[in-house]
């Protein structure tokens, strides 16, 4: 008898199984056979779904309203500084004849 290797299920698969268990159309044994997972695993995923469902309808601020983790003004300033240096150096090298016109 060969031992089955450990499987990892995607979040979408877990959600699908947990929602099917919440519907109550089929028994745990039927769902276990249908999705090829253990009934205890289905019960655990169902409990996780029920605990986390309140977070979907949370009253916290939307993610888009939060301040970005990166300071955009600082990044724009750095881009301007680097562009200025590049233009200065390319101009100086072309005047000295060290920069080819093909670039």
Image (cartoon, rainbow, N blue to C red):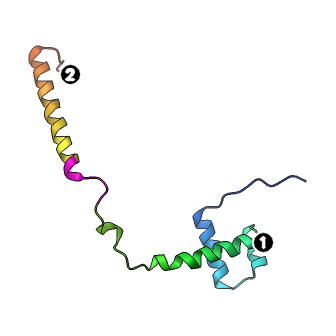
Toward which corner of the image does residue 13 lie, by quadrant? Answer: bottom right
Q: Is residue 84 above or below residue 74?
A: above
Q: Nearer the viewer, mark 2 or mark 1?
A: 1
Residue 37 picture location, percent across and down = 74, 67
Q: Residues within 10 Å of mark 2 (few under 14, many from 20)?
A: few
Locate the N terminus and report the quarter of the image it occupies: bottom right
How far apart are the two marked residues, 2 and 1, measured between alpha carbons?
A: 68 Å
Q: Residue at x 73, y 75 (%)?
A: 31
Q: Residue at x 71, y 57 (%)?
A: 7
Is label 1 in a helix, a strand or a loop?
Answer: helix
Q: Are marks 2 and 1 in contact (CB under 8 Å)?
A: no
Mark 2 vs 1, N-terminal side? 1
Residue 84 picture location, percent across and down = 13, 35
What count of labels does the image hold?
A: 2
Read off the residue under disc 1. Answer: 33
Q: Residues within 10 Å of mark 1 (few under 14, many from 20)?
A: few
Q: Residue at x 53, y 75 (%)?
A: 52
Read off the residue under disc 2. Answer: 102
Toward which corner of the image does residue 8 lie, by quadrant? Answer: bottom right
Is 44 left or right of 33, judged from the image as shown?
A: left
Q: Residue at x 75, y 73 (%)?
A: 39
Residue 2 among those drawn in magenta: no
Residues shaded magenta: 68-74
């Amino acid at each position: 008898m060969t031992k089955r290797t450990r499987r990892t299920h995607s979040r979408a698969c877990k959600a699908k199984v947990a929602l099917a268990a919440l519907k109550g159309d089929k028994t745990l044994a039927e769902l276990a056979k249908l999705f090829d997972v253990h009934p205890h695993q289905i019960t655990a995923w169902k409990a996780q779904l029920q605990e986390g469902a309140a977070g979907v309808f949370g009253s916290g601020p939307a993610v888009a309203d939060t301040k970005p983790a990166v300071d955009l003004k600082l990044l724009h300033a750095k881009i301007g500084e680097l562009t200025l240096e590049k233009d200065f150096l390319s101009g100086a090298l072309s005047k000295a004849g060290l920069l080819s016109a093909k670039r």
